[in-house]
Image (cartoon, helix red, strand yellow):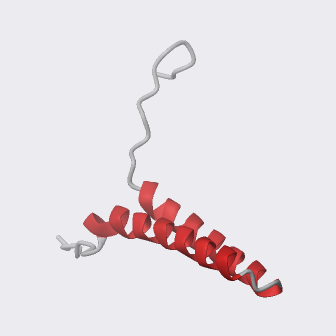
């Protein structure tokens, strides 16, 4: 039998995702405050990417809810 190594970052994944979302908010805040013209567009793009990746890390381990009701397959 082969023993698989556990991912050491798995318990911290939601925390890392939440931190990335707050980092994206901070990037938007600083970018809006500085208002550097075209450089602001780059700041907003970086913030969008960081927010999407952070949101994915934050919610990737949430289990799918059980399906019940008239359309559920058995």
Residue drawn 34% across the image and 65% down it: 15
Q: Is residue 74 above or below residue 30?
A: above
Residue drawn 20% across the image and 73% down it: 2
In the rendered view, does 53 fall on the left or right side of 9? right
Between residue 24 and residue 31, name the one nearer to us.
31
Q: Residue 59, how many percent across, how many down?
A: 44, 54
Total labels: the figure holds 0
In the rendered view, does 16 fall on the left or right side of 49? left
Q: Residue 61, how many percent across, how many down?
A: 38, 54
Name the quarter where the N terminus is drawn: bottom left
Residue drawn 74% across the image and 80% down it: 35
Between residue 6 and residue 35, name the one nearer to us.
35
As drawn, which residue projects farthest toward the top? 70
Q: Residue 48, how many percent across, how many down?
A: 65, 69
Name the quarter where the C terminus is drawn: top left
Q: Residue 56, how many percent across, how many down?
A: 51, 61
Between residue 72 and residue 43, name the one nearer to us.
43
As drawn, which residue projects farthest toward the right? 38
Q: Quadrant of residue 51?
A: bottom right
């Amino acid at each position: 039998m082969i023993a698989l190594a556990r991912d050491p970052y798995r318990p911290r994944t939601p925390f890392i995702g939440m931190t990335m979302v707050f980092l994206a908010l901070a990037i938007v805040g600083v970018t809006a405050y500085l208002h550097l013209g075209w450089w602001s567009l780059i700041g907003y793009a970086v913030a969008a990417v960081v927010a999407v990746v952070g949101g994915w890390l934050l919610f990737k381990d949430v289990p799918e809810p059980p399906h019940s009701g008239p359309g559920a397959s058995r």
